[in-house]
Structures are given as C-alpha cells and as structure tokens.
C-alpha cells in the first residue's frame, strides 16, 4: 500500500481507500470479509455515507477491534426517511442522526466529518452562514466528535468557494476519466494542492459506467455542454486504468472506489501491483469529455415518492444500450418497484447533481424492460 498526506490534517491515508455504499444491503459476512481484507491489505481510509441501522450494525461488526488503526468518515446531512436515503440541512435532524451514527457504530468520533452533498452555491452559502451547518460541525469538532471538517460536492464553483474559505480541511469530489475535460477541474485540483486541502476522489469508476463501456461510446450534446461525439472503446477499461488515472491527478490524497465483494476489492487493489502496461490509461484520456447529464448512480435523487430505486434502474437502462441480456432482464424483474410506478413528479431531477433526465430514463426502462 502507498500512503499520502491528507492535506494539512496530519493524517497519512492509504492511496486507495474504500467507499462502503455498495456494501449496504450485503450479507454481514460479506461486509466483514471485505473490510477485514481491505485492512489486511493496508487500506486505512473508509468512507461511511449512510445512516441506515443495518448498514451501521454491519460496519460496527466489521471494524470491531480495528477502530484505532483506521480513519472513518461521517456525513452531516445524510439521513434516512422511511428506509430511504434523505438529505437534510436541518441542524436538529443532522445532529440527532450524527450522534446516532456514532452510537450505532460504536465509536466516539469520526476522523473526517463531511458537510454532505452540495450541488449549488446557494445551498453552500446557506450552510456556511453564521448559525448554519458549518457551526454545528465546528462545535462537534470542538467536542472531540470529529478530527477535521470536509465537504462533499459535485460542483466546481462550490468546492472552490469552500477551499478559499479556509474553513474546510478535506474535499470529496468526483475525479474520473469521464470528467477529464470538466471546465474548471484542473484549476480546482491545483487550488486544493496550493491550499493544503486534502482531496478525496470519489466515483473513480464513474459509477461503474467506465467498467461497462464497449464498442462505440456515445456522449450526447446535453452531456457535454457542447457538441455530441462518439468515441470508440476497442478494449476493456479496467479498474487499474481508472484508479491509476484518478491517483495521477494533482492533489489527490486518496480515492474511494465502491465494491460489493472481495473479488471487486481485489481488482481495485491490484492497481498497486499492476504493471505499467496494466496501469496505462494514456490511450483513453482523449476519448472522454465532460459528461454532465450522465447518471453515476449515486442515488442523491432519492427519496422517491414511489419508492423507486432510481439509480439501479438508470444503471440497467445504461447497460441495456449494448443489448438487453437475460441477466439484465432478471435484475429488472427482481426490483420491488418498477419504473412504471413513476408519477413524473420531478423531485428526483431537482435533487440530481448531474442534471440527469431521470423521467426520460424511467420511460426508457418501461419501453425496454416492461
């Protein structure tokens, strides 16, 4: 394992950390085996994003006896309602869920407390005002319940303001091949490096999309902010290429790929021992431009009034562009709520940080799978 400084925090984190989102809902033995294998391989940075009781109970079992050897994060504003992820800016609700998070996890602190999921400057400004969520985060840090304060966001303008405020120690931001030409990204990464702000790269696989690309990969106009283009992917894109690209970017301290089993963990960690040929992503960079409007299956669009798993349906629709296999149809059939339940209320599109036309995706799912 390689280790890097997490900005000015004083923490030395593994270059490859671990996102735990995809462990939610997995059998406890799977969760424990993945976490234990990761720790044995040198992973010491784990991003914990949800507040679901079962998710936290499984992670508590996994980290038992290992807490002092790892760095854990929490997300102030990530809560749940009726069993679904729910983002809130209510100070009272945020504090209640965070204290419950610590209790359920069996720890007295997190190492990084993230202000959770910002998509607009207006939302950021509201949280950073006197009496806003930033003050709650600072109080929790003063009480010893957090070592440092971070922010997770998908918007370069938001992150730029956060870094320039000098009140944020760590930034979590998507860095992957799909966003290679994202306007302002290069400047942002350099700003983080200059300011000594730790940079955590999330979504290194683009929500898994990069690992699924085959043949002609079309990026339409609404996704690029410019002209539509097609790129030819002639061979498999591997986890090693994706992670090598992400770790090569300026200022990146660690990246947090999501995995759901030990096989996927092994594929990610293979990056560190891969040959130069296996790590080489140079032939891919020119193929990708900024893809705003592309779903990365983060489920920030939830909760859905119809209890639809929007991210999973979007994933199936995107995968079906290369043909509807038996496995895809079976995965869709197994969903407890189908796309046809969509009322087209638009709430998901208002919350989406990437400008995804979720309603169009639901219509496409109905046409293809139902």
Image (cartoon, grey):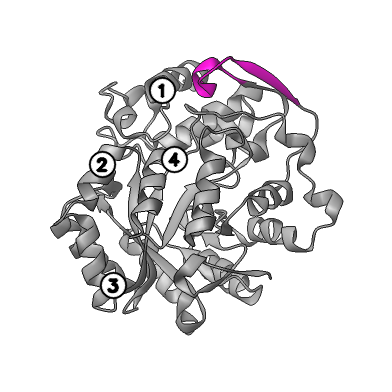
Front residue of 271/342: it is 271
Magenta residues (range): 219-232
Location of mark 3 (residue): 141
Binning the other alpha carbons within 10 Å of mark 4 as few (below 14), some (14 to 19) or many (20 upward) gives many
Crowd tier of the residue under label 2, counting other residues whose Cα lies within 10 Å: few below 14, some 14–19, many 20 or above: few
The quarter of the displayed image where residue 216 is located: top right
Q: Which residue is mark 2?
A: 123
Q: CA distance from mark 2 to mark 1?
A: 21 Å
Find disc 4 in the rendering and name its residue. Answer: 156
Q: Residue at x 50, y 20 (%)?
A: 225
Q: CA gap, disc 4 to disc 3?
A: 26 Å
**Residue at x 61% of width, y 52% of height:** 250
- State the separation of the CA atoms marked 3 and 1: 38 Å
Q: Earlier in the sequence, mark 2 or mark 1?
A: 2
Q: Is residue 229 magenta?
A: yes
Q: Earlier in the sequence, mark 2 or mark 4?
A: 2
Label 4 close to label 1 by CB (< 8 Å): no
Along the line of sight, the residue nearer the viewer: 131 or 77: 131
- The image position of residue 249, as x and y in percent, is 63, 50
- Where disc 2 sits, the SS reads helix
Q: Which residue is mark 1?
A: 357
Mark 4 or mark 3, whichever is nearer to me = 4
- Residue 352, percent across and down? 36, 34
Please report whichever mark, 3 or 1, sits nearer to the chain's N-terminal start.
Answer: 3
Viewer can see residue 272: yes
Whether 262 is drawn above or below 78: the answer is below
């Amino acid at each position: 394992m390689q280790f890097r400084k997490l900005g000015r925090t004083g923490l030395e984190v593994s270059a490859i950390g671990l996102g735990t989102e995809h462990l939610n809902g997995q059998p406890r033995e799977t969760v424990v085996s993945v976490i234990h294998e990761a720790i044995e391989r040198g992973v010491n940075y784990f991003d914990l994003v949800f507040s679901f009781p079962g998710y936290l109970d499984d992670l508590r079992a996994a980290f038992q006896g290992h807490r002092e050897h790892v760095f854990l994060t929490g997300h102030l504003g990530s809560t749940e309602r009726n069993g679904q992820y729910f983002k809130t800016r209510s100070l009272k609700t945020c504090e209640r869920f965070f204290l419950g998070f610590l209790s359920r996890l069996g720890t007295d602190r997190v190492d990084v407390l993230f202000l959770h999921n910002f998509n607009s400057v207006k939302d950021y400004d509201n949280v950073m005002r006197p009496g806003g969520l930033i003050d709650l985060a600072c109080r929790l840090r003063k009480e010893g319940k957090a070592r440092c304060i971070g922010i997770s966001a998908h918007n370069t303008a938001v992150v730029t303001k956060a870094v320039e405020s000098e009140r944020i120690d760590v930034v979590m931001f998507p860095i992957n091949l799909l966003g290679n030409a994202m306007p302002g990204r290069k400047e942002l990464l350099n700003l983080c490096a200059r300011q000594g702000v730790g940079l955590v790269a999330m979504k290194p696989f683009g929500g898994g999309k990069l690992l699924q690309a085959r043949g002609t990969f079309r990026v339409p106009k609404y996704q690029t902010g410019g002209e539509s283009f097609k790129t030819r992917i002639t061979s498999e894109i591997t986890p090693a290429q994706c992670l090598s690209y992400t770790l090569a970017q300026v200022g990146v301290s660690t990246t947090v790929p999501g995995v759901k089993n030990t096989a996927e963990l092994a594929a990610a960690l293979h990056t560190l021992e891969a040959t130069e040929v296996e790590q080489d992503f140079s032939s891919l960079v020119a193929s990708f431009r900024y893809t705003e409007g592309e779903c990365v299956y983060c489920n920030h669009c939830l909760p859905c009034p119809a209890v639809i798993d929007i991210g999973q349906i979007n994933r199936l629709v995107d995968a079906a562009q290369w043909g509807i296999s038996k496995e895809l149809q079976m995965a869709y059939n197994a969903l407890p709520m189908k796309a046809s339940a969509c009322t087209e209320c638009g709430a998901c599109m208002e919350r989406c940080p990437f400008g995804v036309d979720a309603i169009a995706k639901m219509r496409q799912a109905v046409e293809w799978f139902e």
